[in-house]
Image: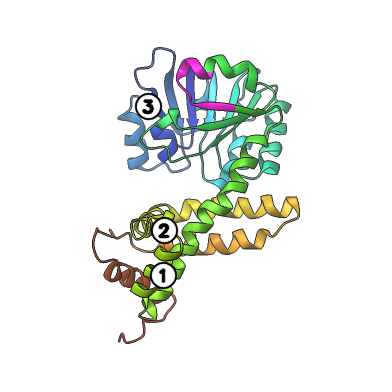
Amino acid sequence: MKIAFIGFGEAARAFTDSLAGNPAASIVAAYDIRQDEEMRQAALSRGLRFEKTVAAAIAGADWVLSAVTADQSLNAAQSVLDALEPGQLFIDINSVSPGRKQQSATLIAGRQGQYLDMAVMAPVHPRGHATPVLVAGAQAHALAATLENLGFHFEVVGDEPGAATAIKMVRSLFVKGLEALTVETLLAASATGCLDRVVTSLADTFPGLGWPDNARYMFERTLHHGARRAAEMREVAATYDELGFVGALADKIADVQEKMGAAPVIDLPPGELNPSVREVAAMRLRAEGKSLPGSR
């Protein structure tokens, strides 16, 4: 099984690393719109060809895995059309709305390619391609034995593209929303000097959330991955709008994720939470041309 990647960021690298040494698979090439040295070395150090064009990357591959940012998913599908060979499988693991995946599936089918909607349901580290995923599409059941042989941890959830990503998108409103709700609440609490009281109150009311370690985790996720999460939440907004619900809620969550992703990354070490949260609050406010109360 020869596999090529379009997009060679965190997910693609994690899949490549976990598939390394698997006799049933061979990662042969990668393409990314970022053509810088770091990206090139990330591919070459893993034994892949790093190509300057999509056509060169997918030539001869059995599977083409699209692992780009959410806002580039349709562009990625369009980029393969001139080079796609009949029967090549396009696996779309991007976090986008069902409507977006259906658009991409239509494009691939128009070139006699096969399309698989794959939704990654947990962080890709440390399990890589063995991270739990949901899959959907006309070929999903036929591909089950191959996916199992390769070591994917998957569940087939439907025959139509979009069925897998719908589950992820609906769920993401809660998961990423809880992150945004947590960090924004604690930043405001720090700015008003009542962080300890707020955390104590939340711990009493919601003990199952594991305060304050839970708060550290939420800050870590948004600081490190806020930009990507923001793009995903824009797609969540589209999903909810398509369903007739309140997509604007996801858009506001995306705003918080985007602001956190733009802030310098700092560690929130074990111990007192207040100094670290106050530092993040100060950085966030400076970006808005403001300052913490009591600061100069």
Q: How many marks?
A: 3
The residue positioned 49% from the left and 32% from the top of the image is 132
Q: Amino acid at mark 2?
A: Pro
CA distance for labels 3 and 1: 42 Å
Indicate the secondary structure of the residue bearing disc 2. Answer: helix
Q: Earlier in the sequence, mark 3 or mark 1?
A: 3
Q: Amino acid at mark 1?
A: Ser
Q: Which residue is mark 2?
A: 207
Q: Earlier in the sequence, mark 2 or mark 3?
A: 3
- Disc 2 versus disc 3: nearer the observer: 2
The residue positioned 37% from the left and 72% from the top of the image is 281
CA distance for labels 1 and 2: 10 Å
Q: Is residue 20 above or below residue 280?
A: above
Q: Which residue is mark 3?
A: 18
How many C-alpha atoms fall within 10 Å of the one at disc 1: few (<14), some, or many (≥20)? few
Q: Is residue 46 above or below residue 251?
A: above
Q: Which mark is residue 170?
A: none
Q: Is residue 228 above or below residue 120?
A: below
